Amino acid sequence: MLTRYDIVSDTHGYLSPELLAELAGADVIVHAGDICSPSDYLTLCGIARVQMCLGNNDWSHDYGPAVKGRKIFYGSGLKWQVTHYRQHLNLTMCDVAICGHTHTPFVERDEWTHTLVMNPGSPTYPRRSRPSMGRILVDDGKVVEAKIITLA
């Protein structure tokens, strides 16, 4: 079964209409921190299941005990890890690794572990790029597509 994971980070208290339109239809939303808004968290939870870590501008008491500095979860036959800072990722312990913080998007395979690593950039305050998010499609335990989506 094809599962769509929409990847966001660094929304900083603003979910643009373009971002919300792109997230419609997601099976899972992965947020790599700096959401900065409990109401935005609830908005995302109304769209799809949310897997989220805390960013340096987030407070755990705003989101409950399940949201911490590192999120590890299993989905679609893969082990996922989400941290705000890339240097906090342990690529030996996951299949897919998501980070944020830099507001600069990229998607790559680690040379040694072959882990898929993605930073979706920021839909709100991009740096050196346009507003962006990521999308990962998984089918039968395999990543079939991983891309950065530029928002209007």
Image (cartoon, helix red, strand yellow):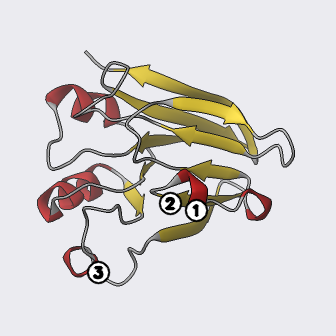
Would you name the residue on which mark 1 appears?
Answer: 88
Would you name the residue on which mark 3 appears?
Answer: 64
Left or right, 139 with reference to 48: right
Residue 46, above or below 145: below
Q: Residues within 10 Å of mark 1 (few under 14, many from 20)?
A: few
Residue at screen point 75% across, 46% down: 115
Question: Could you tell which of marks 1 and 2 lies nearer the N-terminus?
Answer: 2
Regarding residue 3, the answer to whether it shows in the image is no
Q: SS class of the residue under badge 3?
A: loop
Picture disc at residue 83: 2
Q: The residue under label 1 is which amino acid type?
A: His
Question: Closer to us: mark 1 or mark 2?
Answer: 1
The CA distance from mark 3 to mark 1 is 21 Å
Residue 85, above or below 122: below
Of residues 109 and 47, the one nearer the viewer is 109
Image quadrant in which you'd find residue 80: bottom right
